[in-house]
Image (tube, rainbow, N blue to C red):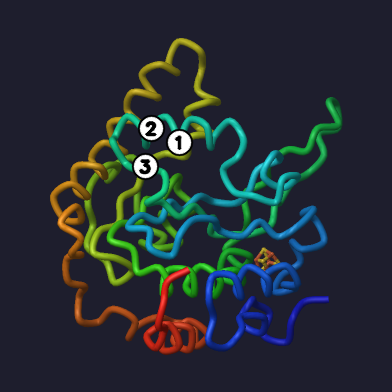
Amino acid sequence: MSSPSGSATDFVPPRPTLAKLRAAAKGCRGCGLYKLGTQTVFGEGPRSAHVIVLGEQPGDAEDRAGRPFVGPSGKLLDRALDAAGIDRDDVYVTNAVKHFKWAKDARTKRRIHKTPSAGEIKACRPWLEAEIALIEPTVIVCLGATAAKSLLGRAFSVTKKRGVAIESHWAPAVFATVHPSAVLRAPREQRSLAERMFVADIRKVGQYLAKHATTGKRPGRPAHKFNEWPITAARSATSNASTRSSRE
Ligand code: SF4
């Protein structure tokens, strides 16, 4: 049974903290994916993070562990962050959709990733909006088309705009690149190049941070930040976040 609003809005708690959000998301019934995934896989990392890395949805390993980016994709992401000089402790990792959507492969019986629908991404968005509102990142890095389109619009093309800093109401800079799982799935002869290109994109994030964040002062946000979010829960989360007194 889904929620009356048909989204996660009904489950986002008032005056949220990351811990409160994480606890509430465990019981989310905002769309039908709660029946498919083993558990909610909420974002992870410090509230003080300058960087949010946004994926599409948890994978098989993440679904079992209940933690984002712990599988092979997460290991590749860690290597890229390391190569880019981005401190993993300055990164909050999360996904546009918090439950694993999958179907069983008839031949191998393995759980195969299925791309979440636009409706499922929209239903889960209050969680993401609340996470962004609390963390107020300097940079959001979208991994893959689903994550990028969820923040930058359906017309956004990762192929055309990968590694480019885009000013947005979500954060002073939003970057997009491929999902590390796409790098890992690349044909053997192309994998090395795909990984180098992925690392190069993350290096651009590192360079942006070095320029804008290492002084401890974040660049100013566009004035319309938080005023144009489409979902009421996010506005509520934001106003609550603005009254916070301490970071987790
Ligand atoms: S995918 Fe998101 S909206 Fe759907 S049940 Fe899971 S946490 Fe809730």
In the foreground, 118 or 1: 1
Q: How many marks?
A: 3
> In the image, is residue 207 above or below residue 8?
above
Say which amino acid is labelled 3: Thr
- The residue at 82%/39% (across/down) is 104
105 with respect to 117 (left or right): right
Of 194 and 238, nearer the camera is 238
- Location of ligand 1 given as a quarter of the image: bottom right
Q: Which residue is mark 3?
A: 177
Image location of residue 46, percent across then percent down: 46, 59
Category of crowding for the residue at label 2, using alpha-carbon neighbours closer than 10 angstroms: few (below 14), some (14–19), many (at least 20): many
Which residue is rendered at x = 33% and y = 23% of the image? 196
Residue 182 percent coordinates (x, y)? 50, 32
Numbered circle sitting on residue 80: 2
Task: Tell which of 113 and 14 is nearer to you.
Answer: 14
- Which comes before the other along the chain, label 3 or label 1? 1
